[in-house]
Image: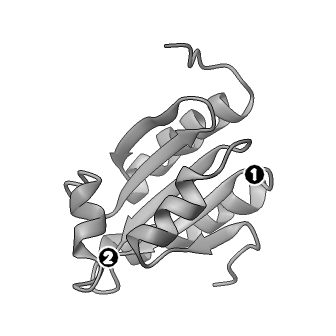
Amino acid sequence: ISIPSNVVTVNSLQEYKTVVGDESSRIVAVRFHATYCRACMAVAPHFYKIAKMNPDVVFVDVPVTQANAALHQGLGVPSLPYGHIYHPQSGLVEEMKLTRKDIPDFREKLKSYSEGNCDVSP
């Protein structure tokens, strides 16, 4: 699988804060996954395809390992694969399961935020 240039892999809380927390102008889509998780592997090509179709969005891959378990636990990720969408002005705006059947919904939600169709005012 070729990984698009707008996909960043993050392995620590510090990297997550830098890549996701410090992004001030672009939408960020995050995929939490594990190498041993079949559903995670099945969704990867779809996630990368969405990334290719949305070059103005930052896509973040977070492989969940024993070394960074505190990262996904601290973010309240209940299961894998899981997705977050962050808006530059509003922070975390969507969180959802990210299995293959959830991809169309994830893609639509991402599209509405990218096109400015979702109200993000507090």
Q: Is residue 119 above or below residue 70?
A: above
Badge 2 is on which residue?
A: 64
Which mark's residue is nearer the viewer, 1 or 2? 2
N-terminal of the two: label 1 or label 2? 1
Residue name at image x 75 percent, y 29 percent: 115
Q: Is residue 12 above or below residue 49?
A: below
Any mark on residue 33, and which?
Answer: none
Q: Position of residue 35 (x, y in %)?
A: 35, 85
Q: Residues within 10 Å of mark 2 (few under 14, many from 20)?
A: many
Query: In which quadrant of the rendered view does residue 45 lie?
Result: bottom right
Snapshot quadrant of residue 19: bottom right
Give the x, y percent position of residue 62. Answer: 44, 71
Q: Amino acid at mark 2?
A: Val
The quadrant the N terminus occupies is bottom right
Quick check: 37 above or below 57? below
Kindly indicate whether the residue at mark 2 contacts the one at mark 1 (C-beta within 8 angstroms).
no
The percent position of residue 30, horizontal first and vertical second, equals 50, 57
**CA–CA distance in space, label 1 to label 2:** 24 Å
Secondary structure type for disc 1:
loop
Q: Residue furthest right?
A: 55
Q: Position of residue 27 (x, y in %)?
A: 65, 43
In terms of secondary structure, where does tag 2 sit? loop
Q: Which mark is residue 54?
A: 1
16 sits left or right of 67 in the view: right
Residue found 48% across the figure and 50% down from its top: 103
Q: Nearer the viewer, residue 47 or 70?
A: 70
Judge the density around disc 1: few (<14), some (14-19), many (≥20) Cα neighbours within 10 Å.
some
Q: Amino acid at mark 1?
A: Asn
